[in-house]
Image (cartoon, helix red, strand yellow):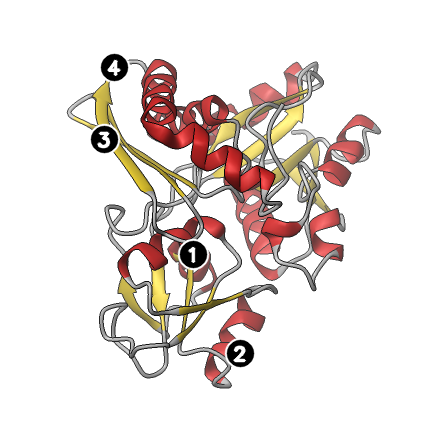
Amino acid sequence: MARLRIGSRGSQLALWQANHISDLLRGRGHTVELEIIKTTGDKITDVALAKVGTKGMFTKEIEEALVERRVDLAVHSLKDLPTELAGDFEIAAITQREDARDVFCSVKFASIDELPHDANVGTSSLRRQAQLMAIRPDLRIHPLRGNVDTRLRKLEAGDFDAIILAAAGLNRLGKTQLIRQVIAVEIITPAAGQGALGIEIRRSDDVTRSQIAFLDDAAARASTTCERALLTKLGGGCQVPIGAFAEIQNGRVRLNALVAHPDGKSVLRETREGDDPVRLGEEVGETLLQRGGDAILEEVYGAGFVVPQQP
């Protein structure tokens, strides 16, 4: 069988993801090698992600390795991948999805509702910040960067009363001990693609595409395609205050979507069903823009909250 070289970031979670894919490929008889690649997003650790003006901050250097043929495929958290890839690349597989929801982690408190007035909550996501502020405007939101262990350590040290993380990362790493509440998507809508892994290859590489085709999950492909179509319509990157969660129900796609101002005072939500994932995402995106999402996003971009937007 083939020798396949995987490119991955070096964080604990990224390595878990790459090793997970490696194990599945080895199970098919392939020889797998792993190359760790440091990305722009890994090098910038002292600035909130929403302040960093680099498109594809977690993917650029890995794509360079693909072009140079140092690696054959790259394993990404799908939410980190720009919705429009350069013409040289494609997402050849989207794996079966982990829990896409966000979770509330705390040492002392059981839920968002139980947090005291003026509690300190850590997150560097404008999407999470906006939705938290909408339901608890009294909270104090603080930037939180670092890998999963660093974030949990800061929580345990008392730097924060609570932090909001993705369920998928904690589940994959087996670090669920501080999860106190799994947050419903109607309260905090996840990021587009959250919980799914995207396997990126060179578009011209037919051999690798055929070798990893078994990793592609139809339900994950349909739901995340819908979410990413919405994101494309809204012109947003992964750090924009946009939420999207789609799931397959009775053969149809159901999409929950959100555009919000970071201060939480203006929150637009839209839920709709459809048969075509791309069309549904685009239609819901257009509806949100017409309802005032365009003004919210223009203000967010203009205020310098966030720069990483899609072409």
Task: Report which residue position mark 3 lands on.
Answer: 271
Figure quadrant of residue 143: bottom right
**Disc marking residue 275:** 4
**Above or below for 251 versus 191:** above
Q: Earlier in the sequence, mark 1 or mark 4?
A: 1
Instruction: Report the Cα–Cα distance between label 2 and label 4.
Output: 44 Å
Q: Earlier in the sequence, mark 1 or mark 3?
A: 1
Q: Are marks 1 and 3 in contact (CB under 8 Å)?
A: no
Instruction: Report the Cα–Cα distance between label 1 and label 3.
Output: 21 Å
Q: Position of residue 144 (x, y in %)?
A: 55, 65
Q: Position of residue 226 (x, y in %)?
A: 38, 24
- What's the residue at 30%, 77% (across, down)? 117
Instruction: Report the Cα–Cα distance between label 3 and label 2.
Output: 37 Å
Amino acid type at circle 2 is Arg
Amino acid type at circle 4 is Asp
Q: Earlier in the sequence, mark 3 or mark 2?
A: 2
Amino acid type at circle 1 is Gln
